[in-house]
Image (spheres, grey):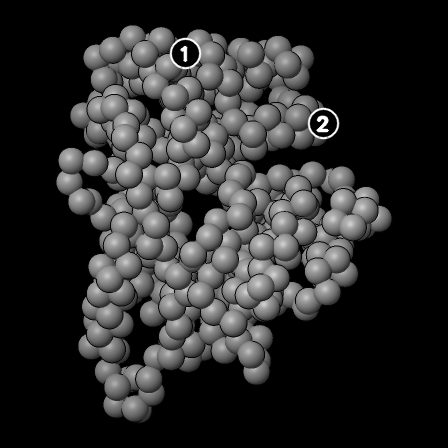
Amino acid sequence: MMQLTLLQQNIINSFQKELPLCSKPYQEMALLFNCNESEVISAINELDEQGVLSRVGAVFDHKKAGASTLAAIAVPPEKLDKIAGIVNQFEQVNHNYAREHTYNLWFVATAIDPMALAETLKQIEQLTGYPILVLPMEASYHIDLGFKINFDRDDKAKPSSRNPEHNVDNNLFIPEKVASLSIEQQGLLRKVLEKGLPKTSLPYADIAEAICVSEQQVQSQIYQWQQSGLIRRFGLVVKHRKLGFNANAMVVWNIPDELVDDIAGQLSSFDEVSLCYRRPRRLPDWPYNLFCMIHGKDRQVVINQITKISEQLLANNPTITSNKQIIEKDILFSNKAYKQHGARYSKARQSTQNLERAHG
């Protein structure tokens, strides 16, 4: 179990969302914890060095930011590491996990547009020699990948939230009319935010200097993207395995089409469920159309939670019971993380020849 200081635990629990949009965000964070800015920056740097953080910055809505899909490959177990390595070479792949299933390699790929995404998937198929199960998101019902931690207790994964009594209002950015960024400048800013904010006293000013705009323009653009929903979450993005959440299950359900929206709403109401999406069936191999994620520190606890959720769904839906329909499901625990970082929406496409040379 990763050992974190109380300050580091408080930072993670309080700022996975709603990073202050002000000139000195780390100073504003320090006010909440009765410490100084340098202590907060130092604590975050240590989290980064320990591999706990993916970044401090924006999580973009994949559908609004570009094109994205969940994908899977059925790989012979003895070749899994090799094939995962090939998939990892693509910058467009931001998450890549081994899971317990015939389809045992699962990854997320993003690109600037559907054509670029299709080209990436085609190249991956050519290099790996295996067909890809492509499962784009059709509907999003619930997204909340925050993790509450307290290493003094065996807490389950729960969405983190800011202290409602703490209203940071000192030097906060106030939306006002400033010159809009050009399309090119917006692209530069997105690339910076995908990689993360600088861990400096004036991160927005530093970003502004790097892309040759004003600090107010940077803050205004981030604010606009938050309001439009392009930025889904703005704060610390953690690597949950480093925090002890190693029992991570993707639960897939075969739900009658006429009930899927209702069932998804019920699933999303459970505290244990952090993500809930509808994706297409790919018959005959893949009959499932509803996906949810449950993260936990103990495999048996997660299994018990899934059992409880399944029983509650059956109890809440007499139509399914009366028609003797069984909600078919499968549980895919992840057992290895090959890659995890923020999405990249680059126009650049990988060179198949270069990748072939890289892998012999």
Farthest-out residue, left: 153
Residue 320 placement (x, y as % from top left): 30, 84
The residues bearing labels 1 and 2 have C-alpha atoms spaced at a distance of 26 Å
Instruction: Give the x, y percent position of residue 262.
Output: 34, 69
Q: Residue furthest right?
A: 353
Q: Amino acid at mark 1?
A: Lys
Could you tell whether 83 is left or right of 352 in the image? left
Return the residue nearer the eye: 223 or 349: 349
Q: Nearer the viewer, mark 1 or mark 2?
A: 1
In the shown orientation, is residue 6 left or right of residue 129?
left
Q: Residue at x 60, y 30 (%)?
A: 190
Residue visible at 28% across and 38% down? 1
Residue 147: image location, x then y, percent: 31, 41
Which is more toward the observer, 212 or 172?
212
* Placement of 83 over or under 216, stated as above or below: below
Q: Which residue is mark 1?
A: 24
Quadrant of the image occupied by residue 37: top left
Within the image, what quadrant is residue 26 found in? top left
Sequence-wise, the earlier of marks 1 and 2 is 1
Residue nearer the viewer, 152 or 9 = 152
Label drawn at residue 184 = 2
- Amino acid carrying label 2: it is Glu
The residue under the point 47% across, 30% down is: 55
Q: What element does badge 1 sit on? A: loop
